[in-house]
Amino acid sequence: MTLIGILILTVFVAACGTVNEPRYISDATSTVEAQIAQQEAQEEQAAIVANLPTSTPTLLPTATFTPTSIPTEIPPTATPTTPPTETPLPQPTEIGADDPLYPQIAAADAAHGETLFNNIIEGASLACVNCHYIDKEDMLVGPGQLNLLYRAGDRVDGQGPYTYMYNSIVHPNDYVVEGYPEGVMPQNFGELLSEQDLYDIVAYMATLKDH
């Protein structure tokens, strides 16, 4: 082979020695590699997530609502009021128990007699208390009535204390205590008062004592 031929052959071989890879093959390869890399990354991420510890949520107990009862206000208890009891007036004692009027006087209403003694009786001008002390034996207009029960039995022979007090109201001039004027006391109380009223007054007069 001549030198010229060798040179031509060398040039031809050099020109044909490197074969260019088609561009579409290179692009496809790059796309596949990218997809593989993306899939591997996704799988790796999924594996990481799968390996994360799963915490079970702790359920907190729900508070049970208990309704608070509203206390019922209890009204104050009323303190019972005991009405004042009237102190009963003492009834005639055994003094003068042999007096004929004793049963009537013992059964009489001394409280009613007190009312009659201390108030003006219809038809009269004055009340008994206007002329007679009830807490003294001294003279006012007439004799004081205190302790008359003890003194009356000795005034008139044959008269017990209750009969004497009764007659001193109905017939005041039959016996006038020494030192007192006659005719001062009205003579008509026997007409203005009933028999029971008279007994009630005598029963009250018998209670006027300090011992």
Image (tube, rainbow, N blue to C red):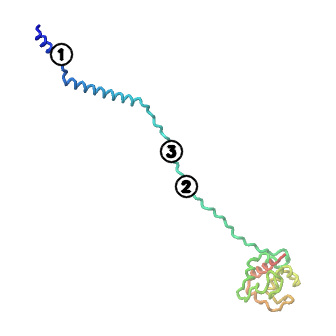
Which numbered disc, 2 or 1, marks the residue that appears first in the sequence?
Answer: 1
Q: How many marks?
A: 3
Residue bearing mark 3: 63
Q: CA distance from mark 2 to mark 1?
A: 106 Å
* Image coords of residue 111 (percent x, y): 74, 77
Q: Is residue 152 left or right of residue 7?
A: right
Who's the residue at 38% across and 28% down the image? 47
At mark 2, the secondary structure is loop
Residue 17 is marked as 1
Observer able to see residue 179 = yes
Q: Circles 3 and 2: CB distance less than 8 Å?
A: no
Which mark, by number, is residue 70?
2
Q: Mark 2 vs mark 1: give the one in front.
A: 1
> Disc 1 and disc 3: Cα gap in Å?
87 Å
Please give the name of the residue rendered at 47% of the width and 39% of the height, measured from the top-left corner. 59
Label 1 Cα crowd, 10 Å radius (few <14 / some 14-19 / many 20+): few
Q: Nearer the viewer, residue 184 or 51?
A: 51
The image shows residue 15 at horizontal and vertical percentages of 15, 17
Q: Earlier in the sequence, mark 1 or mark 3?
A: 1
